[in-house]
Amino acid sequence: PTPTSAPSAPPSPTSVATPTATATSQPTATATIVSTPTPTSTQPAPTATATSQPTATPTSTPEVPLAEPQITLAILKGKTEYRSAEGDEWSAASNGMTLVPGDQLRTLTVSTSVVHFADGSKVKLQASTQITIEVFELLNGGPPEGQRVARIRLVDGEIAFDVAEAPSPPNIWEFLTRDSVIVIHGTPGEIRNYEAEGDTTVNILVGEATVAHVGVNEESGEAELDLFTVL
């Protein structure tokens, strides 16, 4: 007998390919920047327009005329001195200077001066004369609508005066001496009162003046007041 062939070796196991893990790429989260639309104004942005402010135009203030001096001095001859109400010393006066109530004036030897008042009145100081302007005031503009009040003291010496006419009363113009009060009713005249001579002498050139004189009663020796009119 023919030998039979040995049985074939069993087939080699077929190698099964082991599936390889394939790395699957994961989608990457992409950050998407969404631009937010800027709100668009349908109205055009107002442009800041510089409006010109009206310039303040300086208005010129009307000039107020200075008040005229109420009392002034005119030196006619020689030298005159003055002293203010607050002062102690006498100073040389100047021609045309302004005076105020309370000022004192005195003329030296061989000297004369005239004091001019705003109402037109004048008082002339003779040589070696001293006066005090105690009061001078024009109320409501002075006469004729207003009033005038004046009081001049004759300390020593002699004066000539020309007081502007004004109804008296209500207007008052007085001269005072050591022993008398002379009320002038708007008239020219003279007053003399030197210390060495004693009594006051009044001479009225035009019109009249009322005088109140303080004397001494010869019998009682007491002071007495005499009131009389000088023509």
Image (spheres, rainbow, N blue to C red):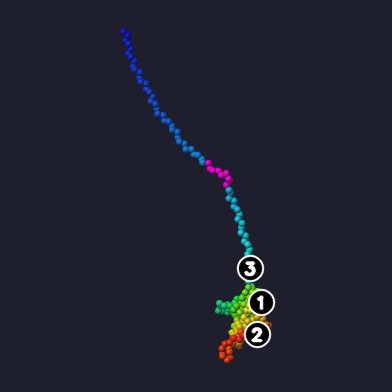
Mark number, residue 146: none
Q: Amino acid at mark 1?
A: Gly
Magenta region includes residue 34: no
Is residue 92 visible to us here?
Answer: no
Mark number, residue 64: 3
Please identify the quadrant where the C terminus is shown: bottom right
- Residue 197 lies in quadrant: bottom right
- The residue drawn where x is 63% and y is 85% is 228
How far apart, in angstroms, are the residues tagged by discs 1 and 2?
Answer: 23 Å
Q: Local crowd at mark 1 within 10 Å, few (<14), some, or many (≥20)?
A: few
How far apart, in angstroms, are the residues tagged by discs 1 and 3?
Answer: 23 Å
From the image, tell me which residue sits under label 1: 120
**Measured from the top left, where is residue 32 in percent x and y?**
48, 38
**Measured from the top left, where is residue 68 in percent x and y?**
64, 73
**Measured from the top left, where is residue 211 in percent x and y?**
62, 84
From the image, tell me which residue sits under label 2: 230
Q: Could you say whether the residue bearing mark 2 is in a helix, strand or loop? A: strand
Instruction: Classify 2 as above or below 61.
Output: above
Is residue 223 visible to us here?
Answer: yes
- The residue drawn where x is 53% and y is 43% is 38
- The residue drawn where x is 32% and y is 11% is 4
**Measured from the top left, where is residue 14 in percent x and y?**
37, 21
Say which of marks 2 and 3 sits in front.
2
Please identify the quadrant where the N terminus is shown: top left
Q: Main secondary structure of the magenta part?
A: loop
- Residue 169 lies in quadrant: bottom right
Extreme top residue here?
A: 1
Q: Which residues are magenta?
A: 37-45
Q: Could you say whether the residue bearing mark 3 is in a helix, strand or loop? A: loop
Q: Local crowd at mark 3 within 10 Å, few (<14), some, or many (≥20)?
A: few
